[in-house]
Image: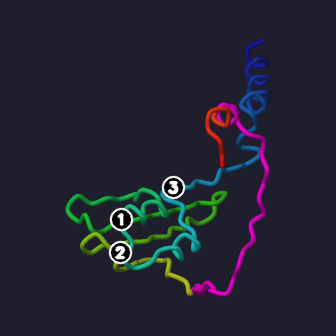
Amino acid sequence: MSTRLLTTSCLLLPFLTGCSYLTPYSLDIHQGNIITQEMVDQLKPGMTPRQVAFILGTPLLADPFHDARWDYIYSNEPHGAERVQRNLTVVFDQGELVSLQGDYKPGEQPNPEASKDVTVNIPRIDREKTLLEKIRSLFVSDD
């Protein structure tokens, strides 16, 4: 009787555990700051640390001994494949961005200059007066 129970439990055990070893599946493992080339292209020399943090986010590593250096590290291990790691180091001098180091390089984006001959006509939108404007018009004339 006990061997029959043991055999049955051994056969049913994979189905009760969700068949995890029969159908291998692994999740993507993302760690660190996700940085894209478009984000790096927005960085310009002379930006303040606050502006850089707005674009890239809070740095993963902030060294208390080197306040002028921020390190952004991102690693991804997609579905059990080989791990990919990217680094970006942002260096400030006297509160201004001076250099970028690492796997990302600033791209060449065209600098569009606004033409001074452009005239934009904005149509007037007639909206109903608010309650406050209606009350105001009772006491003040718009002559």
Inspect the image, locate mark 1, and give the three-letter code of the amino acid beneath it.
Pro
- Which is more foreground, mark 3 or mark 1? 1
Q: Secondary structure at mark 1?
A: helix
10 Å crowding of disc 2: few (<14), some (14-19), many (20+): many
Lower position in the chain sequence, tag 3 or tag 1: 3
Q: Which mark is residue 134?
A: none
For marks 2 and 3, give the CA distance. 25 Å
Q: Which mark is residue 97?
A: 2
Q: Which residue is outermost to the left?
A: 65
Q: Are marks 2 and 3 in contact (CB under 8 Å)?
A: no
- Reading the image, the residue beneath label 1 is 49
For image coordinates 67% across by 50% down, the residue present is 26
- Reading the image, the residue beneath label 3 is 31
Q: Nearer the viewer, residue 103 or 27?
A: 103
For image coordinates 74% across by 34% down, the residue present is 18
| Residue 4 is inside the magenta segment | no
Direction from residue 119 to residue 73 in the image, left or right: left
Q: Nearer the viewer, residue 141 or 94?
A: 141
Q: Are marks 1 and 2 in contact (CB under 8 Å)?
A: yes
* The image quarter in which residue 114 lies: bottom right
Q: Secondary structure at mark 2?
A: strand
Inspect the image, locate mark 3, and give the three-letter code of the amino acid beneath it.
Gln
Q: Nearer the viewer, residue 143 or 99?
A: 143
Q: How many marks?
A: 3
| Residue 32, placed above or below residue 113 | above
Lower position in the chain sequence, tag 2 or tag 3: 3
